[in-house]
């Protein structure tokens, strides 16, 4: 697919009216804050250490460079991508549960990208001087909990499952992977379900990652993805990997970046209308035959130590990734994204308080230890 070769079309223009508050949304948000607070308390009692209430387990953290392409058409020259510049990035690879569980628990993987040296008005008024833009991506294009009400229902169920012994969680993962495979065989893909639902044991560096939720894209509305494009990464796509060791994914990530670089393309999919490309239902996959993903930037990561002790402590205890760490031109949209604002704030505040760490955004790439 050529990066910018789709035919001219009409794209949805951003305005406050693209969002619609959901029935009982405030009640659902309050309940979700309580659910996640209970999960954080449970994890702290288990580990005696404050954890994120989602994507708690890191598998690798790398520094890289994001280069915005210089031949973008007007509809793609928006926000962070308005000018063909290079900026440093910090990338954290993770898995979805809000607990440190063995990698044999098959679950969704995450790729969180923090772009540095980003000037401009920010979406969070309490952090107007932050110079960062975060994109939180998961290795499935949709989430079955597509609105705040179903998200509340699913997280309540997962909160109960999270208290099961680790061997039971691993066994449940095996069963869920088998069920997901059978569903895909008859044309039903349930692997994009709630965090914690079983995913295949494939190499996390060969995965494509998506925003799942919707965000403003300057004058437009979009979803975002990161796609591996260097040959050494695409060779890993779909490759099954052994996960007998509790931190097998960390070891695979460290082994790769010890002597190799990797390249990803950042792609965006622009909304066309609220029916075909809905904002308030993140369970709907936007049809690429109508509005394909189009490349706007390239991320390059050089060889490095992706799991040094100092780097691990900095990212797990000091750093926060939040979709609301963003330019106003990339404000998250939809009820799934709106609930993330208070939930992520709660999580960061609790984690930093429990670990006696200051809350703040990095000022330069030098803040990330070697």
Image (cartoon, rainbow, N blue to C red):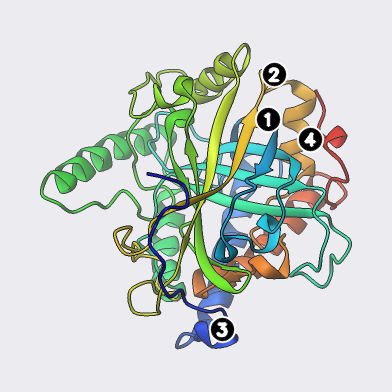
Viewer-side residue, 366 vs 27: 366
Q: CA distance from mark 4 to mark 3?
A: 34 Å
Task: Tell me residue 323's x, y (percent).
Answer: 64, 59
Residue 308 in which image quadrant: top right
Q: CA distance from mark 4 to mark 2?
A: 16 Å
Residue named by callout 4: 314
Q: Mark 2 falls on what kind of element? A: loop
Residue named by callout 1: 62
Mark 4 vs 1, N-terminal side: 1
Q: Residues within 10 Å of mark 4 (few under 14, many from 20)?
A: some
Taking 235 as reference, is 326 left or right?
right
Q: Residues within 10 Å of mark 2 (few under 14, many from 20)?
A: many
Q: Is residue 84 visible?
A: yes
Mark 3 vs 1, N-terminal side: 3
Q: CA distance from mark 2 to mark 3?
A: 44 Å
User: Mark 2 and 1 residues: CB-CB less than 8 Å, in contact?
Assistant: yes
Residue named by callout 2: 304
Mark 2 vs 3, N-terminal side: 3
Mark 4 vs 2, N-terminal side: 2
Residue named by callout 3: 26
Mark 4 vs 3, N-terminal side: 3
Above or below for 283 versus 196: below
Task: Tell me residue 187's x, y (percent).
Answer: 14, 51
Task: Tell me residue 84's x, y (percent).
Answer: 70, 48
């Amino acid at each position: 697919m050529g990066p910018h070769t789709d035919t001219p079309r009409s794209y949805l223009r951003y305005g406050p009216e693209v969002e619609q508050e959901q029935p009982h949304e405030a009640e659902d948000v309050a309940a979700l804050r309580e659910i996640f607070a209970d999960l954080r308390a449970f994890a702290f009692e288990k580990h005696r250490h404050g954890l994120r209430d989602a994507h708690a387990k890191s598998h690798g953290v790398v520094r890289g460079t994001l280069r915005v392409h210089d031949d973008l058409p007007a509809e793609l020259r928006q926000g962070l991508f308005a000018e063909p510049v290079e900026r440093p990035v910090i990338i954290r690879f993770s898995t979805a549960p809000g607990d440190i569980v063995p990698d044999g628990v098959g679950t969704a993987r995450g790729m969180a990208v923090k772009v540095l040296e980003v000037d401009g008005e920010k979406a969070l008024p309490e952090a107007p001087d932050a110079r960062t833009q975060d994109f939180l991506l998961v290795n499935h294009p949709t989430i079955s909990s597509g609105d705040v009400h179903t998200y509340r229902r699913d997280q309540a169920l997962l909160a109960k499952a999270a208290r099961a012994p680790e061997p039971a969680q691993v066994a449940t993962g095996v069963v869920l992977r088998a069920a997901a495979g059978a569903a895909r065989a008859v044309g039903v893909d349930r692997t994009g379900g709630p965090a914690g639902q079983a995913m295949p044991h494939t190499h996390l560096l060969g995965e494509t990652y998506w925003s799942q939720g919707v965000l403003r894209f300057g004058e437009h509305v979009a979803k975002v993805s990161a796609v591996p494009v260097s040959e050494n990464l695409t060779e890993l796509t779909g490759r099954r990997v052994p996960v007998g060791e509790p931190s097998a994914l960390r070891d695979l990530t460290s082994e790769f970046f010890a002597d190799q670089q990797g390249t990803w393309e950042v792609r965006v999919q622009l909304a066309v209308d609220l029916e075909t490309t809905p904002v308030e239902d993140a369970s709907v996959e936007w049809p690429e035959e109508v509005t394909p993903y189009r490349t706007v930037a390239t991320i390059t990561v050089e060889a490095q130590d992706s799991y040094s002790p100092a780097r691990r402590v900095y990212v797990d205890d000091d750093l926060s990734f939040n979709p609301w760490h963003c330019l106003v031109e990339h404000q998250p949209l939809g009820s799934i994204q709106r609930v993330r604002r208070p939930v992520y704030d709660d999580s960061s505040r609790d984690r930093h308080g429990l670990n006696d760490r200051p809350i703040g955004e990095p000022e330069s790439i030098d803040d990330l230890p070697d």
